[in-house]
Every structure is written in structure tokens, then in C-alpha cells.
Amino acid sequence: MNISDVSKRTGLPPKTIRYYEDIGLIRPARDTNGYRVFQHADTHKLAFLGRARTLGFSIEDCRTLMALYEDQERNSGDVKRLAQEHLARIDEKIEQLQSMQATLRHLVRECAGDNRPDCPILRDLAQD
């Protein structure tokens, strides 16, 4: 398969596939003319990486997950620990976003939104 075939099968843009190759997440074979030749296993790995990235795993987490996936002797506890750490980071981001949302909601409510120059939103942003 060529890169456009793999792109269609995995839903990943060719640029992303090339990037994953550049950083060593995948290693497709090369034809005599230098073009990439993807095997079914490459497609499967790319789909795996795409799903992991959709769940917000970092590139380094994806590298670890791929190594664990390929290791038939792996300990599922290692996979779970990685997922739990990622989930904790997501929970922290959600808390931060909820705090931002509450603050902005309050400021929007406080702003009259009329022709007067006084604006609590700008006043809050200008605080040291």
C-alpha cells in the first residue's frame, strides 16, 4: 500500500504518517524507487496511534503504549498506570477549564455591555 491508501484506511493525513515515520513510531519498508510500502501491520499501528492521539495521549505516551502493545510479555499494570496518569492530567485540565469558565461567566454577567466605558472584564484583565 502507498501512503494515500494508508491515509484513507486510517483517517490520518499523509503529513501525520510521515511525521510518525520521522520520529520512529513506524518504519514502513521502502521500494526500490524509494517510495514507502506499507504493510497491514503498519496500517494497524497507525490506526492504534490515531486512536491513542484522539484520546489525548502525548507522542511519548504513544511510544510507550506502542512498545507495551508489541511486548507479549507486558504487564497490564504498566498500561493501566500510564492510562491512570493520563486520566489524572485530563481531570486537572477539566478543573482548570471549569475555573476559567466560572470566572469568565461571572465577569460577563457583571459587564453591562452598554455604551459606558466602564467594563469589569477589562478591569479584571488589567489587574496585577
Image (cartoon, rainbow, N blue to C red):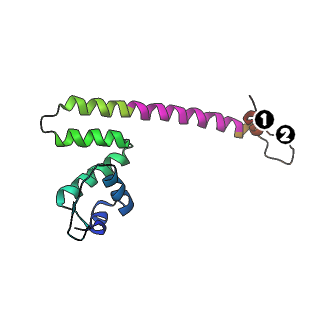
In percent of the image, x 31 and y 68: which residue is there?
A: 4
Q: Is residue 89 above or below residue 9?
A: above
In percent of the image, x 17 and y 31: which residue is there?
A: 75
In percent of the image, x 75 and y 30: which residue is there?
A: 127
In 3D space, how far apart are the residues under numbered discs 1 and 2 (Cα atoms)? 8 Å
Residue labelled with disc 1 = 123
- What is the number of the mark on residue 118? 2
Q: Is residue 102 magenta?
A: yes
Q: Main secondary structure of the magenta part?
A: helix
Instruction: Point out residue 64 in the picture as x, y percentages from the top left corner.
Output: 28, 38
What's drawn in magenta, residue-wise? 88-107
- Amino acid under label 1? Arg
Q: Secondary structure at mark 2?
A: loop
- Which badge, 1 or 2, is on the more N-terminal residue? 2
Report whether 6 appears left or right of 70: right
Q: Is residue 6 above or below residue 80?
A: below
Please identify the quadrant where the N terminus is shown.
bottom left
Residue farthest to the left, as pictured: 73
